[in-house]
Image (cartoon, grey):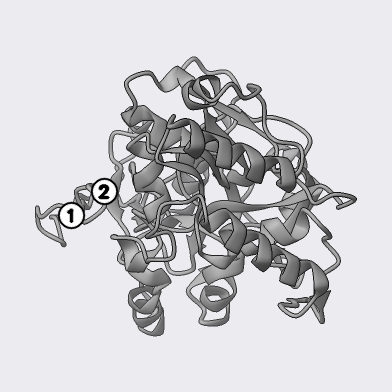
Amino acid sequence: MNGQFPGINYQIAPVEGFGIERFVAEAKDQRSTWDVYVGQTPFVEMSAMAAAGVIEPWDDYIPKDVRDDIIESIGQENLIDGKMYGWPFLLDVIGTGWHSGFTAQANLPDEAPATWDIYLERAKAIVDSGAAPFGATFDSHGWRSLVPFTHSMSPDVYKNGLFDFTSDAAVEALVLMKKIMAYANPDILLEGATDGGVNGTPDEVAFAAQRVGYYNKYFNAPLRMAQNWDDPTQLHLGPLPKFANGAGSTVFWTTGSALFKYGQNKEQVVEYIRALTMTSRSGRTRSSAHPAAILASCRRTSRSMRSGNRRSRTGCRPSSASFAPSSTMPRPSRTTSSGSSSSSSASRSGRPTSRARSRIPRSRCRR
């Protein structure tokens, strides 16, 4: 995609731990090194960046056909006071992934467990059979485990728009997590190795190393981790289990693009983000795939590398580029039904890895 925009200058964003200090400092001087930020999560940094005058709404720039094409619930998540501050880039949905080689070795059905009780029985069976050292794992960050597990019992767990950790459903979810830990990798509660602890998490390491049977996280996590397997086709995906008599729902959130208020090339940004999110290399409409937090600069003159040539902890090389057009150029968690499988890949967002600033695209890093 970037080859279609030869003047693009993209960098990995300086947002480890979700920090936006660099953006805020530049906005105070009414300037921006970049034009667009790819990797924004609505319930994390969007409100803060809007309040600080770092970003502006897309409403005056996004084409009507693109805006009309956005599913209402996804669009709502990206609104502040009725204005659209996030252009959705990808969707993270929490579900279940499993190593079908291990389930076959343990004589288990090749399907996602329908309930948590069945899930626990099968996780134990994987360990008891010797198919894998661990039966199940999850990401211990609350929005990636506690919240979706809670929603699998009931989505009605909010007070004044905030998640109620004392609700019956939340307490049951915590009890469930403790039960899963009996069959999980022992380091499951440790922070991740990169990006302020939110990436390179123990669950990802265990699943990538083929040491665990079942895995609950946003689907792009097992999809990415399975690329390390001898046979990635042994990864199968399905819905999140539910509690007996539970609602059977899960959560999703979007990762999107933010328009820097003091960026200089907004028309070019719109062209780029539209191409990035809606067209494939063949020119056909597509849904977005692997996201990375990225900052892109659509400037017409190139810039030198600001961050040097050192490699970031996520394995992505920080880079800065300019864009020279050849001619013209809510709630933190939302509820969805958990009844369908998924096979699309993405990377991100669970929550952020280093993001990138943009004058344009994003690289292979994940939140």
77 over 343 or under it: above or below: below
Label 1 secondary element = loop
Q: Which amino acid lies under the numbered mark 1 shown in the image of this protein?
A: Arg
The residue at 37%/34% (across/down) is 210
The residue at 63%/48% (across/down) is 62
Q: In this orientation, does residue 76 appear?
A: no
Q: Is residue 194 left or right of residue 254?
A: left
Query: In terms of sequence position, does the residue under pointer 1 or pointer 2 come before the other?
Result: 1
Q: Is residue 26 left or right of residue 99?
A: left
Q: CA distance from mark 1 to mark 2?
A: 6 Å
Pick the quarter of the image with the C terminus. bottom left
Residue lying furthest bottom: 28
321 over 224 or under it: above or below: below
The residue at 48%/26% (across/down) is 102
Residue lying furthest right: 245
Label 2 secondary element = loop
Report which quarter residue 19 is drawn in. Answer: bottom left
Pick the quarter of the image with the N terminus. top left
Q: Which amino acid lies under the numbered mark 2 shown in the image of this protein?
A: Ser
Would you say the residues marked 1 and 2 are in contact, meaning their CB atoms lie under 8 Å apart?
Answer: yes
Q: Is residue 208 left or right of residue 107?
A: left
213 over 79 or under it: above or below: above
Q: Nearer the viewer, residue 160 or 283?
A: 160
Q: Which residue is mark 1?
A: 303
Q: Report x, y in % for residue 282.
A: 49, 14
Q: Which residue is mark 2?
A: 322
Binning the other alpha carbons within 10 Å of mark 2 as few (below 14), some (14 to 19) or many (20 upward) gives: many
Q: Report x, y in % for residue 127.
A: 48, 39
Q: In the rendered structure, find residue 139 and report the number of the disc placed on it.
A: none
Q: Nearer the viewer, residue 167 or 119?
A: 119
Q: Nearer the viewer, residue 237 or 98?
A: 98
